[in-house]
Amino acid sequence: MYIHRTLHDEVKNHLKRKEYTIITGPRQCGKTSLMQALFGELQSSGESVSFITFEDRDILTAINNHPEEVFSFSLRPEKPTNLKELVKHRHFLFIDEVQHASDPSNFLKYLYDVYGENLKIVASGSSAFYIDRKFTDSLAGRKRVFELKTLSFTEYLKFKEKISFYKELDLIRNQSGYVSSHMRALMEEFNNYLVYGGYPEVVLEKDNGEKINLLKEIKNSFLKRDVDESGISNPDKFYNLLALLAGQAGNLVNRNELSNTIGVDHKTTDKYLYVLQNCFHLDLVKPFYSNLRKELTKMPKIYFKDFGLRNMALNRFFEFRSREDQGALLENYIYLRLIELYDTDQIKFWRISETKEIDFIVTTSFGEGVAYEAKMKCKSAKKGVSKSFQEHYPNYPVKIISFESDSECKWVLSL
């Protein structure tokens, strides 16, 4: 049974546009299920649709010979007789795993230019490394890319069929001062989410031991594909870096220290970080400065895009209450919540010393925004740091986000 994803409606609204719709995201996050659901909706409404996958070797061999060969496996739409001709018989072609094509950029560009609006392609690609490398500037203006992430906490509750909790979460976020009668049970689910993450198959599994086995499979099989396809020659050092970064979530990324620790040069470390970012496993957040030159050169902070993969890299699956890294997990969650609400380039952090740092600075308009500080307990917030920041940036009010509900701080689930 397909469970509605938050991104579904946004992608569906784009289907009416001429530009091709490209869905990216980590392996096993649900891209194929989303495409199949969209395919079914179009088919039910009487549209002309086809669905193929480039994991089929026969199809892949054929289209690598010439893009027109794709129509040996789907309906061939009419070619417009002139550039201004209106759509006659539009065909929707869904292509799963498009990055397997030898030159996906040329393949899509050819079909876009030849068939115009009579052909609408909706394609998925698991590895952003390949999509970034092959989807060259020749596709500028011909595509829009959508990133499907692993499940947010809202989607997690939907997948677990916790309908009452899902409704409670909506009320907590949208009604100021609302006090939930299900807070303890809701926090139990939240704690579980912080340990095992949001890969759909993992969330649907009820046994915690099997959750760990599934995450091990994601790390050992699906992440290995990212490693293989990106041309990494020493996977052991790559996995060492992954484990090292997992233990540093929420901290500064010092490339010199990382390189020395795992025994590789800076260029190799940069490549590993590039692959991990562009295969949707982690993000690097830049520092916030009014001086753009400093902003571009200072060390970034690291956050993982799924808790399950992060904890798998460390092989730590203790329940949340007994973990020594509670603060890191909370801060990482707040980052994931913020990228639901804002574009990633709007989110930065402020740091002028080891004792003076604000976790997240969100710029909502020029010179204005909001700052967030993550704390397990509201009382642990250092008011002097907030005061120091606001002296420099008065248009960025500081809000304390606390794991525990407190009248002086914003509760984490109300963000």
Image (cartoon, helix red, strand yellow):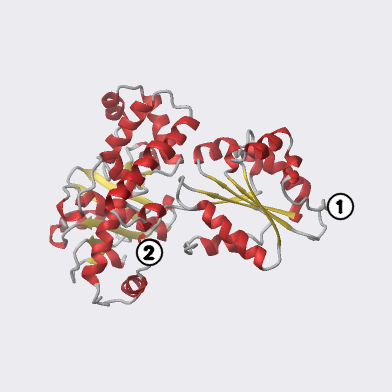
The 10 Å Cα crowd at callout 1, few under 14, some 14 to 19, many 20 or more, is few
Q: Which mark is residue 226?
A: none
Work out whether residue 392 or residue 372 is closer to the camera in this orientation and state it: 372
Kind of element beneath mark 2 = helix
Residue at image coords 48%, 64%: 4
Residue type of the residue flagged with mark 1: Thr
Kind of element beneath mark 1 = loop
Residue 331 appears in the figure: no
Which numbered mark, 2 or 1, is in the foreground of this view? 2
Reading the image, the residue beneath label 2 is 154
Image x and y of residue 310, in percent: 31, 44
The outermost residue toward the right is: 81
Work out whether residue 204 or residue 96 is closer to the camera in this orientation and state it: 204
User: What is the spatial separation of the Cα atoms under label 2 and label 1, in whole angstroms?
Assistant: 48 Å
> Can you say whether 239 is above or below 71 in the image?
above
Residue at image coords 30%, 51%: 196
Image x and y of residue 142, in percent: 66, 48
- Discs 2, 1 touching: Cβ within 8 Å: no
The outermost residue toward the left is: 379
User: Which quadrant of the figure contains the C terminus?
Assistant: bottom left
The 10 Å Cα crowd at callout 2, few under 14, some 14 to 19, many 20 or more, is some
Image x and y of residue 149, in percent: 44, 52
Q: Which is more N-terminal, label 1 or label 2?
A: 1
Does residue 252 appear left or right of residue 364 in this picture? left
Residue type of the residue flagged with mark 2: Thr
Residue at image coords 27%, 35%: 244
Residue 103 appears in the figure: yes
Image x and y of residue 164, in percent: 34, 74
Reading the image, the residue beneath label 1 is 81
Among the 4 quarters of the image, the one containing residue 13:
bottom right
